[in-house]
Amino acid sequence: MSEHDELYIVLQEKTATIFKYLIKNGANPRDAEDIIQESIYKFILNIDSVDPNKAYSWLFRVAINYYYDLCRKQKREVNISFDHFELVDDSLLPEDYVQQIEMKKEIEEILNQLTPLHKQLILLKYVLGLSYEEISEMLDLNLGTLKTYLFRARKTFKDIYRKEKEKHDRK
């Protein structure tokens, strides 16, 4: 297998994860594909200046920056969307299905109250199921720093959830 074949395989795997992340972050599939394509093009143009050990992180950041640029151009807010994330279990009763939809909406609302970094970390860890090592590589963060940030993200999520629940229970 040639060096180019190996690069192609690695790019396919990594961009698939980035694509899923963009979709979970609210990009439509067509925009996500365009962003991935632009990011790979930029990667190829700059391949000599990109540290091979940080290529994944570099590619991820470029894709995210393209997505934020697209959002600014379209003057829309970056909101988490679970539209492409199916929680439905066929064995559920209609009431349970409605409860799941409501829970999904509550989670979206809480995620959209978090800082962009905290949102990003929770999506990468709990929605995409990436390991600490993968997230660390992707974001070019020290593993200890990543774990601290993720701890804070979870804590903030829980705090907001509790406040929302208390507010709902008072009604």
Image: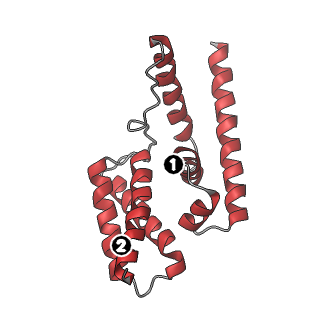
At 72% from the left edge and 56% from the top edge, which residue is drawn? 148
Residue 54 x, y percent position in the rendering: 53, 76
At 37% from the left edge and 80% from the top edge, which residue is drawn? 1
Q: How crowded is mark 1: few (under 14 residues within 10 Å), some or many (20 or more)?
A: some
Q: Nearer the viewer, mark 1 or mark 2?
A: 2
Q: Which colour scheme is used?
A: secondary structure
Mark 1 / mark 2, whichever is N-terminal: 2
> Which residue, given by chain and number where applicable, does mark 1 sit on?
128
- Amino acid carrying label 2: it is Tyr
* SS at badge 1: loop
- Amino acid carrying label 1: it is Leu
Residue 122 position (above or below residue 18): above
* SS at badge 2: helix
> Which residue, given by chain and number where applicable, does mark 2 sit on?
8
At 65% from the left edge and 47% from the top edge, which residue is drawn? 153
**Front residue of 157 and 36:** 36
How far apart are labels 1 and 2 at the CA level?
A: 22 Å
Quadrant in the rendering for residue 38 = bottom left
Q: How crowded is mark 2: few (under 14 residues within 10 Å), some or many (20 or more)?
A: few
